[in-house]
Amino acid sequence: MWMEPFDQAATVLYALSLTSAGGFAALFLLRARRGDADERTRQSLEKHQDYFAYLSANIDGAEPLLPPPGQLSPIELKAIQSKLLEWIETIGGEYRGRLTALCRELGLVEQERKRLRSPKHAVRIEAAYRLGIMRAEQCTDELLQLLEQEGGESTAFVVGRSAAKCAETLDQLRRLLLHLIEYHPDAQQLIADIIASSSLDPAPLYIELLRMEDRETPVCVALIGLTGRNDPDAFGPLNRFISSECKEIRIKAAKALLQYSHMLPMERLGDLIRHSDWEIRAVAIKAIGEWQLDFDIEALNEGMADEEWWVRHYSAASLAQLGPAGYPDRAFDLSAEGGTR
Amino acid sequence: MNTVYPAESGLTQRLFAQVNDTLKAPWTECGVIAASTHGINRHLLHNFAARLNKDGENPAVQVEYEEDTGCVVFLLPGQSLASTHFTALSAKNLLQDADLLIGGMSVAGFSESDPPTEKAMNDFVSFLDGSEPSEIAVYHGQPRASEAPTVVMIDPNADLLEFLNIRLGLQGYDVMPAQDGKEGLRLVASFQPDLVITELALPALDGYQIIHRIRNSPNRDCQVVVLTDQAVEQDICKCFELGAADVIKKPFSPKELEARLKRLLN
């Protein structure tokens, strides 16, 4: 059917207007529903204000914290859950355990466990996140299964952190660690951070990873995880990696090894100070000042003439940290020497 | 409307005697709940006692209405402060459902090893007068507000402010919460607190600016404790350089925080 151009334009405009109006109506509806839900949550929180005061006041008592008296509507339970999860995230120590026990008592763990089996991906991820906060140890295996389904997706980190928080055994933590290393080899720092959120000591797992000498990612994750710790069992394996063929591994091993300065023979420290990698020279020289090690001052003086600015910088800083013993004339030359990069 | 309870009132003396009698035998603990209410008849008092003992949790509960002071008193032999506080939630629901509650409520717990003195009982009764309408005030042996060290607490997390407000209040501190830096500084200038607890990441003014401004204000002797999510090495060093008395990283142990505050303020 032939239509005049004006009629065609009018039809298109009419259709566009209808679509826009429909879109705006849907947006307003969603906004109104969200506003209504927020308002009901606020009212529920207000209604249970005394209950939260009871929890705050008695969180350090000998008796277990009790669920609120009377029946709770789903919206009230949701509001109470939101407040409890917020508290658990901020509060550590023994009080956190009392709040997670209350979450179990309120049936929140079971509720989220059911949501883990939801057909909707977003619901499963949210449930995993909440189970992690509630330290739901009984759900660790289900979280690990969910993690394996996530594969290389970024949401695997959310599920992984939850599984780490809930893990009860080193076997569970090992399964988690190996999965993350396999699917996210570039996220080494994040993997170590996720493993650190577990209440278990991951050092034995990292020492196992150090035995995988032919694989760079597990070794790097282990070296990151072991940095900042002081576990004598790690000292031997770390020492071997200083001569690794991979530069990144050598540097990370040196950083981790220098945490054990009390176990490090002076000759070994000397080797690190004269290492061919300037990054290792710099961290070794920095450690002398930080740990106030009784080391030959001459090596630090030599460091002041190093070709790398960072080595010179840490040499001067360490000499200054050593006090009067570390104040040969050269320590004052930093600015004169152009102490800028 | 709250009734003003004169010091050493008849209510104080009756409660003092009743609680001490209860603690003689066989009970080692006794909880007390008091609430400002309209007049309540004997039948309703029995009904309340029966409903509070619905699950056999408060077998010896005694409920009495004090005509001269216009308040109802629940005596809970064998109950600790925590249990008494929990029972007070149900008692409040009962009173509100019956439209009887006209003022605040207060709860206290006494034990054989820590029996009430007349002064403690008088403080407890005064709490009823000082509490907000419908609020349940917990008497924990804390000093009156005028004697308490003042603390301004600045954190954008309202849930955390609420939690610490109650915790520190029970430790005897007079806490003033603020959710942003500007409001926090206003409270510091108005009340000249003994101590400020601040987060570093704040809207309007950040924690570093708060420390700096306090250090350069007439109230420069006020202690500042940083309680923050972002405590990496550099943040901690900067806080101490600016003059913070302590830095605590979140998630934190409230027990540890309370111990650190006590050390700073004593």
Image (tube, rainbow, N blue to C red):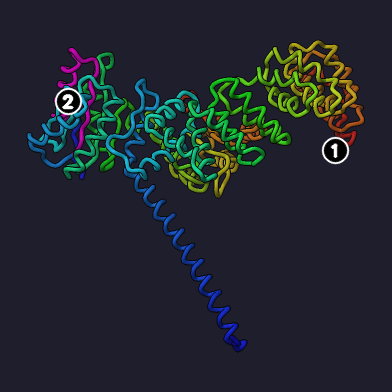
Residue B251 locus on image (x, y percent): 53, 31
Tag nearer the camera, 2 or 1: 2
The stretch drawn in magenta includes residue B30: yes
Tell me how far mark 2 sits from mark 1, CA to CA. Answer: 78 Å
| Closest to the observer, A304 or B55 | B55
Residue B61, numbered circle: 2
Which quadrant is home to the N terminus of chain B?
A: top left
- Residue that lies at the very extreme toward the left in this rendered image: B42
| Closest to the observer, A86 or B12 | A86
Is residue A262 found left or right of A36 in the rendered image?
right
Residue under label 1: A340
Image vertical order of residue A72 relative to residue A217, above or below: below
The residue segment tinted magenta is B8-36
Residue B42 locus on image (x, y percent): 7, 34
Residue A72 locus on image (x, y percent): 31, 40
Q: Amino acid at mark 1?
A: Thr
Please say whether residue A295 is visible from this viewpoint.
yes
